[in-house]
Image (cartoon, coloured by chain):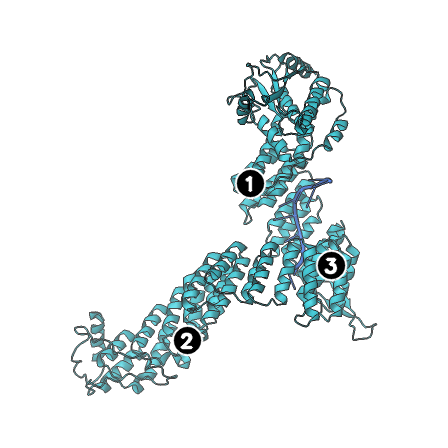
DNA sequence: TCCTGAGGTC
């Protein structure tokens, strides 16, 4: 209490008749400590009058004066002074002033000065006066102002107030709807406020979970985790409800790995999760069937009995993994459990199985599942019907899809947006673009009416039924696909989307890229990426891949490669599809630089941890290599067909060899050693051709060929299968070089010529180990055995020169 | 739980 307060008090006192002497110890000079009130003591029921604690040692001669003064101060909402009196006098007859306090409080609360309200109510709590706020009018005002405060961005102050209110005998949940408070905390991204608030509530665990979930729904994983961690301390025990909520949130935030570490944290404490935690964990990790199955087995080992939800999640996981066989196994198991009476298949089970079959393009069986579920007394819902229609859509059976849609309406099931979208999709899949648009327009203009023959009435009676139709982003995306190559229409749809309050998503933009591509407008297709970056939806790997595909399709390969570089610049990780799209870019041999580009993509892909599917690249390299003998009037087709039979080995070895020979291809060729050890004859042939092609492309007319070319076949091992293979390879290469290319080839025997230059400085030495191989071959391995002999072929530089002349003149 | 975007040889 400050001296200003005292002054105020004096002024106020003068307004009251018969001023008695001031208290013995004025508060400004000797403030009394606040009266102490044991916590257990003052939990009174709703008070209609204010009761002040008694202080037996105080003189009470002036009590009535101070009661009057306090009443007046309270009524005028001068609570600082009011408290001082109460504190100083220690005992005031509450009955006198309770009404005034309420009046004053009401005006204070209604002033909207929440901070002041917090201070004043805090004062009441400190003095152990706890009934006041529970007065009807004051309580209503407090509720009103709290709500106002939440809306006006005073979250922290509102929580302060709630904290003070928790000192009164009332339920915090009654002051404000918990949802309202939590929503505001989530909107403000303020987990600390949510934690404080949840801690005040009677049903703390529920409010904590609510907060965790709401943060998760907004994609704010970090805040959700903060609240979760705080809930652990606050709730004092391991709360499975909180655990399953945070795991669900991991799913909402697409962070399934986080859910695993949360689960592992629980296991590390030797705490066994309950069924709900296991189900949530499996659900969040449904994208990983292996993991889900492991968890499923583990929960059984722990004696946690799976319920139908567990099985439904497993089925969903199979569905995502496109594992029809596993899904069928699990389904049979569930059927078995049902026959024993321990489980009941539900609409989820059937719907998921329908989707499993729909994805496997087994639409008849999908339809069969529907009959089965109806037989079992389970009514298909909108999801079930969507999956059924989707089964037909995927199979291109548009008419069947319409029949099912009709059937759904007849069954009295209201179609939702997704059902409508699937039906539109069925039209698109069947290339009935007009039909899709007609349907859409009829729905949109709200004239969409279906005659619903109510089965309980006479069959002649028809009840027209209006189906509410709310297009979603997916609706527009499907329609954009129905634009074919009409990019004007597609663009118009995107604009329409915005006008109806929808936002284009990644799919919309990628589809637009495809539409531009289809119309041959590469420039605009690529431009979409820029537009995306400027919008709320930055391009993702799929958008880039779509754009790259457009470039590839229209033979703008340099643009494709530059987009690839760009996506890496933006740290967008290419995936298998991206790599394959690029590797497939060149269907014909081109220049050395093009081959090198592809090889570098190939190596990048392996570095990124993808198991390359090098079929295309191998084709490409082969074609490119074979290209140099095309001029020799050989039938390329013939050669290729003979190649195919022999290409069984690990393709990566071949490609690595070609790549390592070519990656230094732009350096000046001094002497060339081609290592074909470990390759099949066809592969060896490709590598030799690749090197020749590189030499040819780097050759400028008039250049001088300084060295012979060596081909290293390997160490001779007499009488083995390896020797036979080596001879095979040798003959193939000799045949190729002599007959197809007209080169002069010499077989080099055991003598190692000293003029061969293979060293680390040689850019064409693919294997540093080769030097060692040569060294070893020079040394007798054992006195009793013949020395190992390195078999090589030499292509003379004279003939190489002639060949290059011939080629460059051609 | 259902709908919409990029790749596709054995």
Mark 3 and mark 1 lie on one chain; the one further toward the N terminus is: 3
Work out whether A59 lies above or below A785: below
Locate the C terminus of chain A and report the quarter of the image it occupies. Answer: top right
Residue A315, position as x, y percentages in the image:
65, 60
Q: Is residue A770 left or right of residue A131?
A: right
Residue A241, position as x, y percentages in the image:
50, 67
Q: Is A121 or B4 nearer to us in this picture?
A: B4
Q: CA distance from mark 2 to mark 3?
A: 55 Å
Q: Residue at x 71, y 49 (%)?
A: A482
Q: Nearer the viewer, mark 2 or mark 3?
A: 3
Residues at badges 3 and 1 in contact (C-beta under 8 Å)?
A: no
Which quadrant of the view contains residue A423? bottom right
The residue under label 3 is: A389
Q: Nearer the viewer, mark 1 or mark 2?
A: 1
Q: Chain of mark 2?
A: A
The chain coloured cyan in the image = A
The chain coloured blue in the image = B
Question: Which residue extends farthest front?
Answer: A784
Q: Chain of mark 1?
A: A
Q: Is A139 or A387 nearer to us in this picture?
A: A387
Q: Residues within 10 Å of mark 1 (few under 14, many from 20)?
A: few
Locate the N terminus of chain A and report the quarter of the image it occupies. Answer: bottom left
Mark 1 and mark 2 lie on one chain; the one further toward the N terminus is: 2
The residue under label 2 is: A141
Q: Residue at x 53, y 25 (%)?
A: A772
Q: Secondary structure at mark 1?
A: loop
Q: Residue at x 55, y 40 (%)?
A: A608
The residue under label 1 is: A608
Q: CA distance from mark 3 to mark 1?
A: 39 Å
Residue A447, position as x, y percentages in the image:
73, 62
Which quadrant of the view contains residue A341? bottom right
């Amino acid at each position: 209490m400050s001296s200003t307060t005292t002054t105020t008090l004096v002024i106020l006192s003068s307004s009251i008749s018969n001023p008695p002497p001031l208290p013995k110890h004025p508060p400004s000079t000797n403030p009394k400590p606040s009266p102490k009130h044991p916590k257990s003591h003052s939990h009174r029921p709703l008070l209609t009058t204010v009761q002040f604690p008694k202080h037996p040692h105080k003189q009470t001669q002036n009590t009535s004066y101070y009661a009057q003064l306090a009443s007046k101060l309270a009524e005028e909402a001068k609570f600082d002074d009011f408290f001082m009196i109460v504190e100083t006098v220690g005992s005031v007859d509450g009955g006198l002033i309770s009404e005034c306090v309420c009046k004053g409080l009401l005006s204070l609360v209604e002033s909207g000065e929440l901070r002041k309200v917090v201070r004043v109510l805090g004062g009441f709590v400190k003095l152990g006066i706890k009934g006041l706020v529970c007065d009807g009018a004051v309580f209503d005002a407090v509720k009103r102002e709290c709500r106002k405060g939440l809306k006006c961005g005073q979250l922290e102050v509102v929580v302060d107030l709630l904290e003070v209110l928790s000192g009164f005998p009332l339920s915090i949940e009654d002051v404000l709807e918990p949802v309202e408070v939590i929503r505001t905390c989530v909107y403000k991204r303020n987990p600390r406020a949510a934690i404080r608030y949840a801690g005040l509530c009677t049903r703390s665990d529920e409010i904590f979970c609510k907060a965790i979930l709401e943060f998760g729904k907004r994609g704010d994983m970090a805040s959700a985790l903060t609240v979760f961690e705080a809930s652990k301390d606050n709730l004092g025990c391991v709360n499975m409800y909180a655990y399953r909520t945070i795991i669900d949130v991991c799913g909402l935030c697409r962070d399934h790995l986080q859910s695993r570490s949360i689960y592992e944290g629980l296991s590390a404490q030797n705490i066994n999760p309950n069924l709900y935690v296991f189900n949530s964990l499996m659900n969040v990790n449904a994208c990983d069937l292996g993991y889900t199955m492991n968890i499923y087995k583990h929960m059984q080992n722990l004696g946690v009995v799976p319920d139908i939800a567990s099985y439904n999640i497993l089925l969903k996981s199979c569905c995502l993994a496109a594992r029809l066989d596993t899904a069928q196994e699990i389904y049979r198991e569930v059927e078995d459990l049902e026959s024993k009476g321990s489980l009941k298949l539900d609409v989820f089970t059937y719907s998921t199985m329908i989707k499993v079959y729909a994805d496997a393009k087994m639409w008849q069986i999908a339809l069969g599942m529907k009959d089965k579920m109806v037989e079992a007394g389970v009514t298909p819902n909108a999801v079930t019907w969507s999956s059924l229609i989707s089964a037909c859509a995927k199979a291109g059976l548009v008419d069947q899809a319409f029949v099912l849609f009709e059937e759904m309406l007849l069954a009295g099931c209201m179609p939702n947006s997704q059902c409508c979208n699937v039906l539109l999709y069925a039209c698109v899949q069947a290339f009935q673009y007009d039909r899709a648009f007609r349907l859409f327009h009829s729905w949109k203009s709200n004239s969409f009416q279906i005659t619903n023959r109510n089965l309980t009435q006479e069959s002649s009676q028809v009840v027209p039924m209006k189906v509410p139709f709310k297009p979603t982003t997916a609706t527009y995306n499907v329609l954009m696909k129905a634009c074919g190559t009409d990019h004007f229409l597609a663009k118009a749809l995107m604009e329409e989307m915005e006008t109806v309050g929808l936002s284009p998503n990644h799919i919309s933009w990628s589809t637009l890229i495809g539409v531009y591509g289809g119309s041959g407008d590469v420039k605009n297709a690529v431009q979409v990426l820029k537009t995306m970056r400027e919008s709320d939806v930055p391009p993702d790997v799929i958008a880039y891949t779509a754009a790259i595909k457009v470039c590839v399709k229209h033979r703008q390969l340099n643009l494709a490669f530059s987009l690839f570089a760009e996506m890496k610049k933006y740290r967008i990780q290419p995936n298998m599809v991206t790599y394959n799209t690029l590797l497939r870019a060149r269907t014909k041999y081109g220049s050395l630089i093009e081959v090198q580009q592809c090889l570098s993509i190939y190596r990048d892909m392996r570095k990124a941890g993808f198991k390359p599917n090098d079929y295309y690249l191998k084709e490409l390299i082969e074609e490119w290599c074979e290209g140099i003998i095309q001029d020799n009037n050989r039938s390329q087709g013939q050669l290729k067909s003979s190649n195919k039979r022999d290409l069984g080995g690990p393709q990566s070895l071949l490609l690595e060899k070609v790549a390592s020979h070519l990656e230094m291809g732009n350096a000046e060729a001094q002497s060339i050693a081609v290592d074909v050890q470990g390759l099949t004859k066809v592969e060896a042939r490709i590598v030799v051709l690749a090197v020749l092609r590189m030499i040819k492309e780097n050759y400028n007319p008039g250049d001088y060929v300084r060295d012979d070319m060596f081909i290293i076949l390997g160490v001779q091992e007499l009488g083995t299968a390896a020797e036979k293979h080596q001879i095979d390879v040798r003959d193939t290469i000799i045949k190729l070089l002599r007959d197809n290319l007209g080169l002069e080839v010499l077989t080099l025997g055991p003598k190692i010529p000293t003029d061969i230059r293979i060293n680390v400085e040689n850019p064409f030495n693919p294997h540093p180990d080769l030097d060692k191989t040569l060294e070893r071959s020079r040394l007798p391995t054992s006195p009793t055995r013949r020395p190992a002999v390195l078999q090589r072929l030499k292509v003379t530089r004279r003939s190489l020169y002639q060949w290059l002349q011939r080629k460059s003149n051609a």
